[in-house]
Amino acid sequence: MAHRSRLAGFIIDCETDDIDTAASFWSAALGLARVDTYDDEGAQYAQLANAAGELHVEVQKVDHPSRVHLDIESDDLDAEAERLEKLGAKRIKFVKRWWVMEAPTGHRFCIVRMKHPELGSPPNVWE
């Protein structure tokens, strides 16, 4: 069965005790307004708005070394994980509502649920 996916955005993982200071820096550095800070099951996030191409950009408080990772959104998480495994990626762990994956290059990324397929660039359709 066909499914759809596309680049959703970037998550700026910050190993910090102060999400507000981290979010303020990235908001100013990227010229993106800070619109929301929230807690999701113990994880802290600060959402930034008005990124190019309607990409989703967030600052996330983490307990691992700081890095930037991208999110791929899909209307079928498992089908997208299988597609990417065929390209050489591997599943690391299912967390809350998304797959953490690792590319053959060692980069971590996530597959998240598609929220607004009608916004932004059209999703790719995969058979």
Image: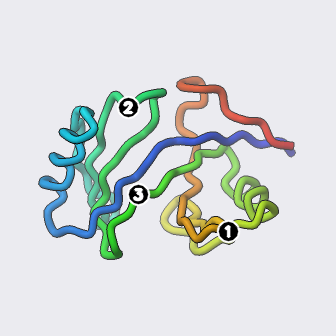
Q: Mark 3 and mark 2 in contact? Answer it, CB < 8 Å.
A: no
Q: Position of residue 59 (x, y in %)?
A: 30, 52
The amino acid pointed to by label 2 is Ala
Q: Is residue 86 left or right of residue 103?
A: right
53 is higher (above) or lower (below) than 9: above
Q: Quick one: label 3 or label 2, which is nearer the N terminus?
A: 2
Give the labeled residue for mark 2.
Answer: 51
Name the mark on residue 104.
Answer: 1
Counting from the top left corner in percent of width and height, residue 13 is at: 34, 61
Cβ–Cβ under 8 Å for marks 3 and 1: no
Asked if labels 2 and 1 touch by Cβ distance under 8 angstroms, the answer is no
Q: Residue at x 67, y 33 (%)?
A: 123
Q: Position of residue 46 (x, y in %)?
A: 26, 48
Q: Is residue 39 left or right of residue 94?
A: left
The amino acid type, in three-letter code, at marker 1 is Pro
User: For the residue labelled by badge 3, is the local secondary structure a helix, a strand or a loop?
Assistant: strand
Label 3: how many residues lie within 10 Å, few (<14), some (14-19) or many (20+)? some
Which labelled disc corresponds to residue 68? 3
